[in-house]
Image (spheres, rainbow, N blue to C red):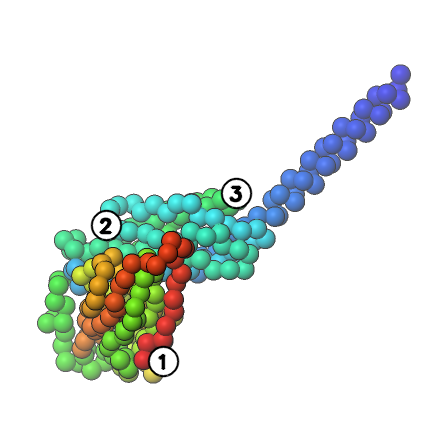
């Protein structure tokens, strides 16, 4: 009896076709993480530097992407990342902080980023550089100093006023390269280990202006004066000191922390 056979064959064909269509739609409807760069070279940094770099990643797919975990290859590197879903077209960040204390010499470290992107659920980022002596400036010649980049900032302090504990405000400082070579911000140091940075430009050309953001996460209550040392390849003044001031108080009510962005003057 050929007719039942043909009917069954048609059903199987339609079912197979629907499976292919669904699979094709699923393959297209997903997030896609594209990193601005996958390797960052700090160059030579002074021992003791908390070298920090922020990797930017864009979702160029059609569905939100969630990053549930970021794993550093060693305890010398501390990662933090965007916890909220990265929507299509939006940008997230992965921050890597390398602790160079007691680690002289070259380093090359990996950071593994895990996501719900089925096409590529794992990305590996790298930071590298060399840890030099604590005082690098003593070996610099006058000629090298004359050709150096120079970091200039309008103000070296900023007051947040009253802050509720749990808030993570950001102070913005305008910085300028008044030197003759490109300026690179290499990291920040603070006694509280509660400050992270981001520069609007990875490399600031001579005469250019960039924005330096300092994100402050105070852990102590009361009046706080945090001295933040900004490290750069400025051979004349490689350690620029900025001061963040705040009066940290208990949160008045339980609520989600909100970031505040303020302009440094």
Labels 3 & 2 near each other (Cβ < 8 A): no
Examine the rendering and report whether any part of residue 129 can be seen: no
Is 195 rendered above or below residue 20? below
Q: Name the residue under label 2.
A: 76
Q: Which residue is drawn at 65% across and 45% down?
A: 25
Q: Which one is earlier in the sequence, the residue at label 1 or at label 3?
A: 3
Q: In which quarter of the image is residue 230?
A: bottom left
Q: Name the residue under label 3.
A: 118
Quadrant location, the C terminus:
bottom left
Q: Which circle marks residue 208 in the picture? A: 1
Labels 1 & 2 near each other (Cβ < 8 A): no
> Crowding at label 2, few (<14), some or many (≥20) Cα neighbours within 10 Å?
some
Quadrant location, the N terminus:
top right
Along the line of sight, which residue is nearer the eye, 213 or 31?
Answer: 213
| Left or right relative to 147: residue 8 | right
Secondary structure under badge 3?
A: loop
Secondary structure under badge 1?
A: loop
* Distance from Cα at disc 1 to Cα at disc 3: 41 Å
Q: Residue at x 70, y 41 (%)?
A: 21
Along the line of sight, which residue is nearer the eye, 191 or 178?
Answer: 191
């Amino acid at each position: 009896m050929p007719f039942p056979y043909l009917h069954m064959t048609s059903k199987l064909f339609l079912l197979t076709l629907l499976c292919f269509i669904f699979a094709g739609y699923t393959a297209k409807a997903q997030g896609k993480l594209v990193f601005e760069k996958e390797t960052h070279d700090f160059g030579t940094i002074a021992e003791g530097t908390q070298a920090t770099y922020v990797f930017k990643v864009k979702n160029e797919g059609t569905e939100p992407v969630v990053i549930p975990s970021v794993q550093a290859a060693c305890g010398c590197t501390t990662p933090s990342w965007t916890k909220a879903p990265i929507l299509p077209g939006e940008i997230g960040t992965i921050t890597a902080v390398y602790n160079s204390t007691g680690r002289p010499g070259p380093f090359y470290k990996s950071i593994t980023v895990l996501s719900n992107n089925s096409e590529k659920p794992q990305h590996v980022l790298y930071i590298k550089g060399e840890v030099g002596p604590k005082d690098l400036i003593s070996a610099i010649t006058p000629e090298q100093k004359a050709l150096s980049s120079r970091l200039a900032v309008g103000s070296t302090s900023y007051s947040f006023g009253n802050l509720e504990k749990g808030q993570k405000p950001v102070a913005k400082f305008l910085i300028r390269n008044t030197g003759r070579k490109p300026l690179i911000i290499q990291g920040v140091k603070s006694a509280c280990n509660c400050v992270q940075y981001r520069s609007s430009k990875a490399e600031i050309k001579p005469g250019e202006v960039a924005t330096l953001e300092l994100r402050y996460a105070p852990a102590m209550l009361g009046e706080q004066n945090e001295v933040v040392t900004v490290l750069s390849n400025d051979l004349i003044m490689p350690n620029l000191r900025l001061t963040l001031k705040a009066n940290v108080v208990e949160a008045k009510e339980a609520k989600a922390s909100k970031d505040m962005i303020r302009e440094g003057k």
